[in-house]
Amino acid sequence: MKGTQSEQDQEPVPRMQRLFDNIWLLLAVGLAVMLIVYTGWGMWEILTMPQATLP
């Protein structure tokens, strides 16, 4: 048939398209990025805070 392709003729699905099609993997990646960024930001704030003077 003219309009159909066999399994061997089809192009493989690109890696990024497979990532964007998997909603649970996107959720996990989003949560991991937020966890890493906000934890790193908090640690940076704590470590660069000036030492308090005690009365």
Image (tube, helix red, strand yellow):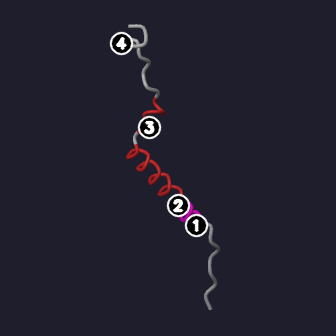
List the residue tagged with mark 2: 38
Write the start and end of the magenta stretch as one range: 40-45
| Lower position in the chain sequence, tag 3 or tag 1 | 3
Q: Nearer the viewer, mark 2 or mark 3?
A: 3
In the rendering, which numbered label is found on residue 19?
Answer: 3
> In the picture shown, does residue 26 fall above or below 6?
below
List the residue tagged with mark 1: 47
Is the residue marked by circle 2 packed among few (<14), some (14-19), or many (20+) residues within 10 Å? few
List the residue tagged with mark 4: 6
Distance in Å between CA atoms under marks 1 and 2: 14 Å
Say which amino acid is labelled 1: Leu
| Lower position in the chain sequence, tag 3 or tag 4 | 4
| Lower position in the chain sequence, tag 4 or tag 2 | 4
> In the picture shown, does residue 51 fall above or below 29?
below
Q: Residue furthest bottom?
A: 55
| Lower position in the chain sequence, tag 4 or tag 1 | 4
- Residue 55 in percent (x, y) is at 62, 92
Residue at (44% x, 37% y) in the render: 19
Q: Nearer the viewer, mark 1 or mark 2?
A: 2
Say which amino acid is labelled 2: Tyr
